[in-house]
Structure formats: structure tokens, C-alpha cells
Amino acid sequence: MSNRLKRTFVSGITLLSIAAASPLSAASSLNLNKALGNPGFSREGTAIAVIDAESGQPLAMHNQDIPLNPASCMKILTAAAALSSLGPNYRMKTSFYSDHEPTGGVINNLYVHGTGDPMLVSEEVWKAARDVRGVGIQKITGAIVIDDSFFDSHEFPRKNGNDGRAYAAKTSAAAVNFNAITIKVAPGDGAGAPAIVSVEPPVDYISIVNKVTTGGKYNVGISSSQNSHGETFLLTGSIPKNAGVQAIHRSISDPIKFAASALAFALRQNGVEVGSTVRHATVPQGAHLIARKNSKPMSELIRSMNKFSNNFIAEQIAKHMGAVRLGSPGSTSKGISVISEYMRSIGIPQESFSIENGSGLSDQTRITANALAQVLASAYSDFAIRPDLISSFAIMGVDGTTRNWKFADRVRGIARTKTGTLGGVSTLAGYVPMKSGKIAAFAILVNGLPKGADAAHRAEVEVVKMIAEATP
């Protein structure tokens, strides 16, 4: 006996709740037995739920009520909760203050109060610096003061062993460039010559020690150490003469100094004289507001998060939601509370899921395939969030995390999916139209990969093809 969704109506809003279910429709041509024999799957470690997104009627199930690790498909929950609780047009604010109104184009301290904008990249920082210069400020005699008190800390609970990787960057209420840098390494003039190294953004926080030589196999190693001004990255190893430019992404250790350094760089580009002092403090009472920078709308943040499975955006959104709904400082635990509240509000019982963080970079997060498919069906029934959630998913074989999936031929450009990958975990969830014209919501969770991640991806796509070709 499977579960199905029962619709109820509260104040005009359609909610989905779990009800006792009848067996799967005998008219359904969707049979998972053949798919489960694929060597890319472990039958015992695979859970699949396929339901009619419109009616909630189950179409095919396997191990649907066994909690498994969803990897980055966890971001579906974070996205749905954010769109529902904050709204698609919601924007996060970054505000710039001085101690007093500028006098003669001079201020003492420039305060930056962030609320977690996850996409405050170099271009946006430059625009903010232009706005500061635009009100007549020409010189900052004191410090750039970063106020990131809107979040509790720079850390979030996560899978261990990811320090230094850009996909595991620290959170911060005042964050720049995803709290990460890109180091570019290119071969030098000839064998034995030093490699050519550059870094983005080229700010004072970063120092590079280049010990990479040209010639031999590609083998570039990076280590880092903090200093009084920022962080030094030591590059060692070799790069082939014909390798071209190689991009390496790394997280930074001190979001406060990094944000201040990036802002100082942009201010100087806009003609503002800036000293070298950086402080970490809160904006004082009565400070003078100079400028305010709004983030991209939540719909665009969610799109960047899901299409490219960006962990940093997910964790920033989770902490921000926690602060808005439950009071600052925002924390991962508060964000999880908001997500869990959303799950319960659409009728999904607490025992169906256990969440460690907002991104799915976790060994602890668990959810059933049935519950994940129900989240998709609930979002599909709520037109206030449906268009933005669907558009945030990768178009199978076309863009996002599935852009190189050449094996997705019959559903290429048709299925909208979210992928998830961790060590020993591969997941795929989303929507696909069926031959009948109905839209299926599906969740495929694979824990334990007998033939590796690529084989699991191919097996998952075969299930999606089966769903698309079924005639329920």
C-alpha cells in the first residue's frame, strides 16, 4: 500500500496532506522493475516516487518511505520554503553608513551592514562603491567596518573534509564573491619557466606565492595560511606547456577582511581615498545612511542556487530565512525550523525527513522519496511559487548541472530536474511531461553506487524516460 496526497483548502490556498492510499492504478504503464535491474542502481539503496503533479495520485513507487540522503536535492526544500515564506520578489539588503553626515566629502568610518545577500559579486560591490562616491564622498579617514551580526557565525553544520573548497565556503551576512576566489594558472614561456598566475578578484586580502613550473603533467597543489592582512595562497607543482588556462576555485578563511578588501578596491576604482584599517563591529545607533543595495529577487537567487547546485547560496538563504522568521541572528538551526514548518504545513510528517543544513552538503540529512515528490507536487499546485521553482531547475541536457548529459536524448530539453551528488550518493528529482499530457513529479534517491556516479546518472535518466513515455 502506497501513500497518496489529499487536497484540502485553507483560506483559498491548496495544501497537500498525506492520506491512506489505494494501490497504484492498474491503468498505469509505468513499471519500475526493469529500471531497478539497471546495474547503476542498488535495489535496496534506491527509492523512487512518481506521482501525478496535478492530482497527487501515485503512479509508481519503490522504497518510497525509506529515508535516504538526498544530497543536493535538499535544495528543493530550501527553495520551496523560501519562495513560500519570503516570496519570489523578496530582496535582501546591504546598507552603507557613516558616523555622521559627510562633511566636505570626508567621512570617518564606512559601515557595511549585510543581511546575507549571496550574490554580492565584484560587479555589485563596484556599483555600491559608485553609489557611495555618488553622494559626494571622496575620502574615508577611519576604517571600513563590517557588521555581519545578522548571522550567528561563519560556519554551518556540514559534511567534513571540505575545507578550502569553494563549494563549502563559509557563510557571512556580509559576503562578497561567494566568499571564494578564482586562481588562474597558465603555462609560462617554456619548459622550466614559472607558470603565469592571476587571481580574481585582485584584492589586497590575497597574496600569491607561485612555485608552479611549466612542463610535465598537470599537478597543481594549493595551500593557504592567514596573515595580519589576509591570506597567502601557495601554489606548487607543474602545468603542461599546452594546458591552456586552468581555473581553480578556493574558499577564503576570513569573510570580514575579504569583504572589506573587495569594497576598498572598488572604492579606489571610483576615486574614493581609503585607508587600510578594517574593523568588525556593529553599526552604531544614529549612524547616517549613505546607500542601500538590494539583492537580486529571491526567484533569481533560487534559480542560480538550483541550476548550478550552489551550496553557498542555499546556506545564506537558510540563515536569512531563520533571521526573518524567528529573529536575528540567523542560524542554520533557525533556517531548518522554517523549512520544517513549511514541510509540515503541506502535510508532510516530521518523521519523513531529518535536516542538517540548507544545501544538502551533509552526511546526516534524510528524506523519503515520497516526501520529496510531495514537495514538488505541493509547489506545482501553488501558482504563487510554481513558475519560479520549475524555472530554477536544470533543463535536462541543456543547462545547469545536466548540461553535459548527452545520454538524456529522449528527454533532452523536456525534463526539469535537480541533481544531487555526494560520495556514495546520487539523486535526481523534478518534473517531466508524460504522453498523456499530465505532468509527473518524481524523486529518485540512490544511496550506494555499485557502478559509480556516472552509471547512477544514466540509470536515473532511464527512469525519467520511462516516466515520459508512460500512459497512466
Image: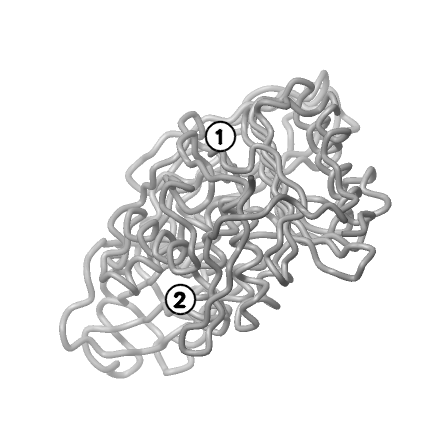
Badge 1: few (under 14), some or many (20 or more) residues near its Cα, within 10 Å? Answer: few
Under tag 1, what secondary structure?
strand
Residue 264 lies, with reference to residue 271, above or below; the image says above
Residue 471 lies, with reference to residue 188, above or below; the image says below
Q: Nearer the viewer, mark 2 or mark 1?
A: 2
Comparing 71 with 49, the one in front is 49
Residue 389 lies, with reference to residue 349, above or below; the image says below
Query: Which residue is rendered at x = 31% and y = 80% of the image?
Result: 105
Query: Which residue is rendered at x = 39% and y = 35% of the image?
Result: 158
3D distance between C-alphas at marks 2 and 1: 46 Å
Q: Position of residue 60 (x, y in %)?
A: 66, 42
Q: Amino acid at mark 1?
A: Val
Badge 2: few (under 14), some or many (20 or more) residues near its Cα, within 10 Å? Answer: some
- Answer with left or right where residue 243 lies relative to residue 247: right
Quadrant assignment for the N terminus: top right
- Answer with left or right where residue 111 lies relative to residue 233: left
Q: Position of residue 370 (x, y in %)?
A: 54, 44
Q: Residue furthest left?
A: 285
Q: Position of residue 380 (x, y in %)?
A: 59, 63
Residue 374 seen? yes
Residue 211 seen? no
Q: Amino acid at mark 2?
A: Ser
Q: Which residue is mark 2?
A: 85
Q: Residue 413 is drawn in which quadrant?
A: bottom right
Query: Which residue is rendered at x = 79% and y = 28% of the image?
Result: 242
- Answer with left or right where residue 334 lies relative to residue 468: left
Q: How many marks?
A: 2
Q: Which residue is mark 1?
A: 209
